[in-house]
Amino acid sequence: MTRAEFRENLLVALDTLRTHKVRSGLTVLGIVIGVTSVISVASIIEGLNRSIQERVESIGSRTYFLSRIPFAMLGRMPEKIRRRKFLRYADAQYLREAVPSLDFVTSFQNRPSFGERTTGPNEIRYQSERVDRLILRGVEPEYWQAIPLFSVAQGRFVTRYDVDHARPVAVIGDAISNSLFPQSDPMGKTVKLNGRPYEVIGVFEKDPGLFGGPGVDQFVAIPLTNFRKCYPEIRDVFLAFSIQREANLEQVKNEVIEAMRRLRRVPRDAENDFEVISPDFLSSLWNQLTGALVVLTGAISSVGLLVGGVGVMNIMLISVTERTAEIGVRKAIGARRADIRAQFLMEAVVLTFTGGAIGILTGATVAWAVRTVLPSVPATLSYLWIALGVAISIGVGLFFGYYPANRAANLDPIVCLRYE
């Protein structure tokens, strides 16, 4: 097809759209719905994927966690997991000695404000101000190295001296600081944490959390020894270890697992009675959660595109019937089958491309609205998905438009000229 023929076919297709506006609009509605669902959901998922990746990077690519139970287990735990032995503080020192390729090992404990029936809610007060939705964590000085997300913006972190002397000092989240000290400097102030006095020595960098969940802003960190003294009923201990840069990640991780199995006297043929959580556990969990969403979106968009494609085929068959005489005249003056086929294929592609363009714009609008209304869901529209939306719409036009176009190309010119 020459450039002139392409331009002529395009103008004829656009003229057909203008002549039958309502019919064309209803025809492309399915395409619009299908492409909109693909673009909007893909934008949301891509934005969330980017946030997840940033969160994984903020944890550290060489940091692993040891836990008695899985981090992301939902519902009631099996009996064999509930009966596992608790990790101990001394396990950190054992790993330091047993695995020399570790950069550091640190232990920490949690006292959340929710989801724990045995602990009760946490509360922090300063004068008349009060915050009660916070997570209390007992930490060692190496903790911020394990999770750089807990870096200090103001003041300092817990030191070895604080841990050795079980000092009542606290590092608070940015949101907690803003709530308790809206007009003053929090450094050196004495707050009441669950009824006990603590000196504020630092404020964490701002981090509102992921998808509206708890972030560093809702944390208060105190020396681990002080935590153990005040909350002896909390028995779950977590370990974090980082592998030296020159060491092989998988090999050192296996050494840690073998060391823990020896320490906990796990039989050779038994499975681990502890969990090793890799830095990308958030990515793995997210991929599992979004798998069903991707399948559902694909099904919805496929139905929309199928309906739109059938509509395009139907409207093109009607168009072939209405323009039978025109086809006969064009063949009589020298138009080839390929020319007729290209003309009707162009009309089908213009129909679906128009629907695809509207769907892309609508999907981009949905992504922008979601990002504006819910800042914790950073929907992002990439050029890849724009190109994919265009390719899908053109592909639907070619696939569903070929049969009507081929039927038009194979019409007998004599029969066409006699058609009324």
Image: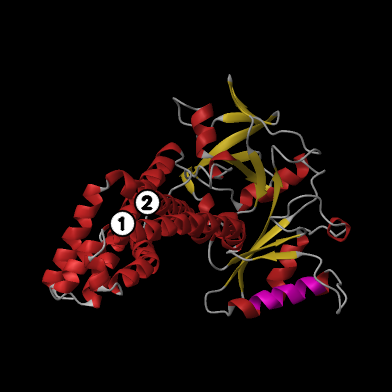
| Residue in view at x 49 percent, y 45 percent | 207
Q: Which mark is residue 351?
A: 1
Residue for badge 2: 27
Q: Is residue 256 magenta?
A: yes
The answer, for residue 100, to whether it is visible in the render is no
Q: Is residue 268 left or right of residue 125?
A: right
Which residue is at the front of the view, 290 or 108?
Answer: 290
Write down the region rendered in magenta.
252-261
Q: Quadrant of residue 271?
A: bottom right
The C terminus lies in quadrant: bottom left
Dot 1: element: helix
SS label for mark 2:
helix
Give the residue drawn at x 50%, y 42%: 208
Q: Is residue 384 left or right of residue 273?
A: left
* Residue 381 or residue 165, whichever sits in front: 381
Direction from residue 144 to residue 375 in the image, left or right: left
Q: Nearer the viewer, residue 187 or 367?
A: 367
The residue under the point 53% across, 50% down is: 150
Q: What quarter of the picture does the N terminus occupy?
A: bottom left
Amino acid at pointer 1:
Leu
* Type of the residue with mark 2: Thr
Q: Is residue 272 visible?
A: yes
Magenta span contains residue 68: no
The answer to whether residue 354 is above or below residue 391 is above
Query: 10 Å neighbourhood of mark 2: few (<14), some, or many (≥20)?
Result: many
Tell me how far mark 2 sits from mark 1, CA to CA.
Answer: 8 Å
Picture coordinates of residue 394, whole percent (x, y): 33, 64
